[in-house]
Amino acid sequence: MDVVSFTRMADGTKADYQFLDEQEGEFIDGLPARLLEGLSSLSESFSGYPVSRLEHSLQSATRAHRAGESEEFVVAALLHDIGDLLAPRSHSEMAASILRPFVSEKTYWIVKHHGLFQMYYYAHHHGGDRNARERFLDHPWYEDAVRFCEEYDQNCFDPDYDSESLSFFEPMVQRVFSKENSFDEERVARTGVQPG
């Protein structure tokens, strides 16, 4: 079978959907390579900073790696701004959505909210609320998000920092994206398989 037999999903057969599952599996296996390609394209994204968005991402991941953070956390730091290219107004949510099936709920939450948390450093300069993150003050991962922004985001624009290369992180990206380990409602509904 090269293509499914239907033009409306409601008309698909079990064989059609088994075929599509196989195709999707192969496509998902290529996700790490597409993510690395996407990161590489951040070298040409909007400027104004002393480093490219790619270099910012590499500094973030390098600092996390050198500080002894978990591999999952390092990969999340590497990818935290990958949404800048396609979702500049909601980049945090996009990056978090990419990571969600592969990382812990804590890591997902930190990446999802880092855009709001990083506003602490600049929002007041243009009339915004630098303390907007305080709406999450009672959240168990509030301090973790503050720490992420302080140690692995706001300080990663240094043109003299000796970052590791993208290829250095490639094996980590491959490993993190080789297993789904968080709760993904759509996947559970589709396959009936619970994570874990």
Image (tube, rainbow, N blue to C red):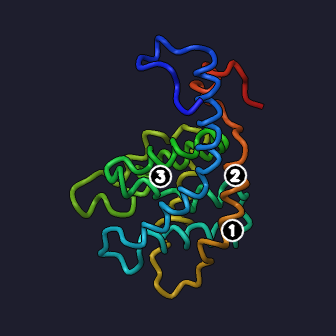
Q: Is residue 83 visible?
A: yes
How many residues crowd mark 2 within 10 Å: few (<14), some (14–19), many (20+)?
A: many
Foreground disc of the pair 2, 1? 2
Instruction: Identify the residue position indicated by label 1 in the image.
Output: 65
The residue lying at 70 percent from left, 61 percent from top is 172
Q: Nearer the viewer, residue 160 or 87?
A: 87
Position of residue 62 in the picture relative to residue 57 (left or right):
right
**158 vs 4: above or below:** below
Disc 2 from disc 1: Cα separation: 14 Å
Disc 3 from disc 2: Cα separation: 20 Å
Instruction: Identify the residue position indicated by label 3 in the image.
Output: 114
How many residues crowd mark 1 within 10 Å: few (<14), some (14–19), many (20+)?
A: some
**86 vs 61: above or below:** above
Q: Quadrant of residue 108?
A: top right
Q: Quadrant of the N terminus?
A: top right
Where is residue 85? Give x, y as percent. Answer: 37, 57
Instruction: Identify the residue position indicated by label 2 in the image.
Output: 176
Q: Quadrant of the C terminus?
A: top right
Position of residue 67 in the picture relative to residue 155 (left or right):
right
Q: Amino acid at mark 2?
A: Val
**43 vs 137: above or below:** below
**63 vs 11: above or below:** below
Q: Amino acid at mark 1?
A: His
Foreground disc of the pair 1, 3? 1
Foreground disc of the pair 3, 2? 2
The residue lying at 71 percent from left, 63 percent from top is 171
